[in-house]
């Protein structure tokens, strides 16, 4: 199994595609939230999925306020054609009170699933020991066609 960890903000949307007030979309219908995902970025994501046959695990902060099933509906309404198989655990602090970062959540998921290959689509700079699998996007542009080649190179490894 090949896994693509996906963030939403600044990956599947960008500064060029936000609500007019810059605030997150708030509405009970998935069709409305799908407006928060840029169709261009969804097309690029679909291209990665088509070329790698990867499945998606959501690592986005959106999972903190929406159920996985609701997020699947949002992605479907936005035009996503792949499969979302789950989301990363929410790890806010260690037992000692130290902060946990997104890469800790991804690593915890990986330790339990052990996929054959994985890549991470995220605008966060620090992915710790997972940096070799990180495809870094920017606030200004989000996911771009040049990221497809990076993802294919990471995910289509030959054992």
Image (tube, grey):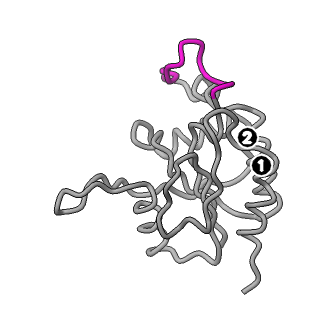
Q: Nearer the viewer, residue 41 or 72?
A: 41
User: Label 1, on which residue?
Assistant: 46
Q: Nearer the viewer, residue 103 or 110?
A: 103
Taking the spot 71% from the left edge, 69% from the top edge, the residue there is 154
Taking 134 as reference, is 94 left or right? left
Q: Secondary structure at mark 2?
A: helix
Taking 46 as reference, is 91 left or right? left
Q: Quadrant of residue 13?
A: top right
Residue occupying the far left of the picture: 96
Q: Residue 149: horizontal and vertical position, in percent?
A: 81, 59
Q: State how many labels appear.
A: 2
Circles 1 and 2, Cβ within 8 Å, touching? The answer is: yes
Residue 16 lies within the magenta run: yes
| Label 1, label 2: how far apart the Cα atoms are | 6 Å
Q: Residue 138: horizontal and vertical position, in percent?
A: 63, 41
| Neighbourhood count class around disc 1 (C-alpha, 10 Å): few under 14, some 14–19, many 20 upward | some
| Placement of 94 over or under 158, stated as above or below | above
Q: Quadrant of the N terminus?
A: bottom right
């Amino acid at each position: 199994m090949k896994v693509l960890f996906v963030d939403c903000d600044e990956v599947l949307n960008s500064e060029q595609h936000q609500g007019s007030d810059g605030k997150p979309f708030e509405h009970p219908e998935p069709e409305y939230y799908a407006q928060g995902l840029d169709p261009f970025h969804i097309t690029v994501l679909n291209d990665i999925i088509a070329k790698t046959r990867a499945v998606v695990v959501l690592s986005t902060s959106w999972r903190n306020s929406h159920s996985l099933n609701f997020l699947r509906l949002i992605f479907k309404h936005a035009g996503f054609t792949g499969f979302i198989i789950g989301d990363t655990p929410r790890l806010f602090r260690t037992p000692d009170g130290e902060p946990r970062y997104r890469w800790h959540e991804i690593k915890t998921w990986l330790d339990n699933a052990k996929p054959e290959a994985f890549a991470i689509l995220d605008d966060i700079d620090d992915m710790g020991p997972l940096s070799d699998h990180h495809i870094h996007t920017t606030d200004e542009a989000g996911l771009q066609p040049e990221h497809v080649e990076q993802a294919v190179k990471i995910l289509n490894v030959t054992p």
